[in-house]
Amino acid sequence: MTGAKILIVEDEPAIQELLSFNVMRAGFQAVCVGDADSAWEQIQNHAPDLILLDWMLPGISGVALAKQLRTDARTRGIPIIMLTARSEERDKVLGLESGADDYITKPFSPRELMARIRAVLRRHVPQMPDETVAAGGLELSPASHRTTAKGRAVELGPTEFRLLHFFMTHAERVYSRTQLLDQVWGSQVFVEERTVDVHIRRLRVALEPFGMDGLIQTVRGSGYRFSVS
């Protein structure tokens, strides 16, 4: 997706300059801001194709901004890559649960960062069939990117939408985390298997108010299955 607009939210000038240089050298557009408030204003006026979001920002943190973006219908679908010096597993999980699509720890190589940007952008390019699918009281329309449960709207992030679409079109079969990563994220994506668990949990939370979280079943030692029986 050459030419995509990347919003860089980073308060350290040297890192901001490094990110901007590599983003533009890779053929993307770069817009830089140094805090969450400026990022929010920029996003509202000119929505980017992807956000590189630093965890530690002055004032509102990157994690808080990610959560804010995911609760607003206008910004829910914008992919986010979280940048941080935190490398503990619990921090990675927190970053993903805040709404980030991917997570990269500092210091990182420009080559790896560009690979992750391309992978996340590819993941958000619509590649699924337009046909509406229905199962277990759920109806999902790729064309309109809408999901309903017994006629009521279900709010899903882009990754959860793709994950549910895959499950609904492959019902009753068990898929391992590795298989789900290949099918939903793509085989070239640098994502840990634990990421699948985070998005499964997020999908169940979205379906829970409708009593449909049980459609996504954990098969101990094997993976996950979508079952209406």
Image (cartoon, rainbow, N blue to C red):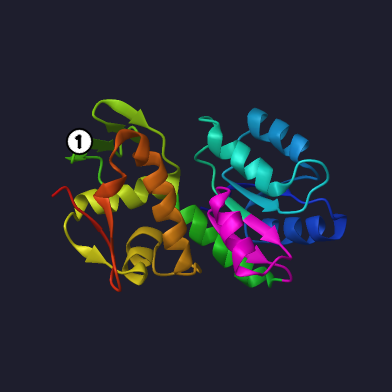
- In this orientation, does residue 165 appear? yes
Task: Examine the rendered structure and indicate whether residue 65 appears above or below residue 10.
Answer: above
Visible residue check, residue 30: no
Q: Position of residue 124 (x, y in %)?
A: 45, 49
| Among the 4 quarters of the image, the one containing residue 226 | bottom left
Crowd band around label 1 with a 10 angstrom C-alpha radius: few (<14), some (14–19), many (20+): few
**Magenta segment:** 82-107
Q: Nearer the viewer, residue 52 or 25?
A: 52
Residue in the picture at 50% in, 30% down: 73
| Picture quadrant where residue 225 is located | bottom left
User: Which residue: 29% across, 31% down?
Assistant: 148
Q: In the image, what residue occupies the spot 68% across and 51% down?
A: 53
Q: Is residue 42 left or right of residue 196?
A: right
Q: Which element carries disc 1, helix, strand or loop?
A: loop
Q: Which residue is mark 1?
A: 137
Frontmost residue, 177 versus 228: 228
Asked whether residue 87 is drawn in magenta, I would say yes
Name of the residue lying farthest toward the left? 229
Magenta run includes residue 166: no
Q: Quadrant of residue 95?
A: bottom right
The residue lying furthest to the right in this view is 13
Residue type highlighted by circle 1: Gly
Rendered location of residue 101, percent (x, y): 53, 54
Q: Position of residue 67 (x, y in %)?
A: 60, 41
Determine the residue positioned at 32% across, 62% down.
183
> Number of numbered discs present?
1
Decide: is 110 above or below 166.
below
- In the image, is residue 3 above or below residue 109? above
Is 21 left, or right, of 88 in this rendering?
Answer: right
In percent of width and height, residue 3 lies at 58, 49
